[in-house]
Image: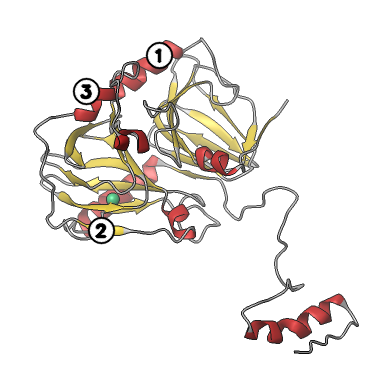
Amino acid sequence: MTITAERSSDASARENLRDLLAKYHCRVHQPSDPPLFSREPKSPMQSHHWKWAELRPLLNAIGQGIDLNADGPRRTLRLASPGLESGTTPTFWASIQVILPGEVAGAHRHSASAFRFVMEGGGANTTVNGESYEMNTGDLVLTPAWAWHDHTYNGSTPMIWLDILDIPLMHVLHATFFESYDSPTQPVSNVPDRSSRRYGSGLMRPTEPSRDEQTLNPLLAYKKQMAEEALHQAEGVVADPVDDVILEYQNPVNGKSALPTLSLRLQKLRPSMRGAKRRNTGCRLYYVVRGKGVTRAGEAEFRWSAGDFIVIAPWNWHSHANLSETEEAVLFQVTDAPTLKALGFYREELEK
Ligand SMILES: [Fe+2]
């Protein structure tokens, strides 16, 4: 094989080789290709603010307009960040799930890791690999990768929770597995709250965790009361310059993040707190549990209150302030920092 290329310019040489190389499923970089590298991250994603006052009617609309079939898709309102084709961040999706009295979200499992943070209501149950957990406002319930899970609800008013899954990461890695259970719900173990009873203290644990318990986080539910009490105890001891008083829900076996790809955190901005600016690779999503404040992200200014969501795009300078002089603000935060750290891509800068 003889390959000749005009050398009149690098651009034409590259163009002249395009068809020949394509026959062999090869290519060279073309001048029209986007650059491979940028001096710093340049994401098409934009930081964004979803207001509860606008989300609430949308949730009512999907609650009234979409039926939930136990063997069909969930009834969820996805938060789609501007600049992305789909999803909330490049690695995870945030959705708000609405479940009505008497409904069942049928059992299935998938290779994406997921969790729920209960926004409103109580009394639903999530069953994970046969263990059933009651869900009430402020509780966090995990459904780790490839764990069977279903939700049932026998309350009297609609229940709403935040659903987060690392679906975009699973998609980009072409690592999607999904399986439906052969009935809407799983048999429930006769040992209630097994994982909470073994690991829920956070300080004591079984002397010999099983192999499975060492592979995936064995603690499936983190109760609101435990998390709020821990945050209260931490108040004033050590504070983050940006996020103020903040604690992470941890895997009790290895001390790492609750899910391998995502770090879940609860934080308190004390009255009148004015935080420093930070930028980092990866994304942060905040859900306002209570309080009022303002988050500045790049040129944008988001004035938030309870029920709002704010997402920070990669490498976007951001800071928070509590606008009240007397009331604390509490935020639930999700970040994909564990994914970036595991791959060596995590960087952050704090404004001096
Ligand atoms: Fe699921």
User: Tags 3 and 1 in contact by the CB under 8 Å rule?
Assistant: no
User: Quadrant where the N terminus lies?
Assistant: bottom right
For numbered disc 2, what is the local secondary structure? Answer: strand
Q: Position of residue 6 (x, y in %)?
A: 86, 86
Crowd tier of the residue under label 2, counting other residues whose Cα lies within 10 Å: few below 14, some 14–19, many 20 or above: few
Is residue 141 visible in the rendered image? The answer is no
Ligand 1 within 8 Å of disc 2? The answer is no
Q: Where is residue 86 in the image (x, y as percent from the top left)?
A: 46, 59
- The amino acid at mark 2 is Glu
Image position of 104 (left or right of 344): left
Picture disc at residue 197 = 3
Image position of 193 (left or right of 79): left
Residue wearing tag 2:
179
Q: How far apart are marks 2 and 3 (CA)?
A: 29 Å
Q: Position of residue 178 (x, y in %)?
A: 30, 58
**Which of these two is toward me, 218 or 258?**
218
Q: How far apart are marks 3 and 1 (CA)?
A: 23 Å
Ligand 1 within 8 Å of disc 3? The answer is no
User: Quadrant where the C terminus lies?
Assistant: top right
Q: Which of marks 3 and 1 is nearer the N terminus?
A: 3
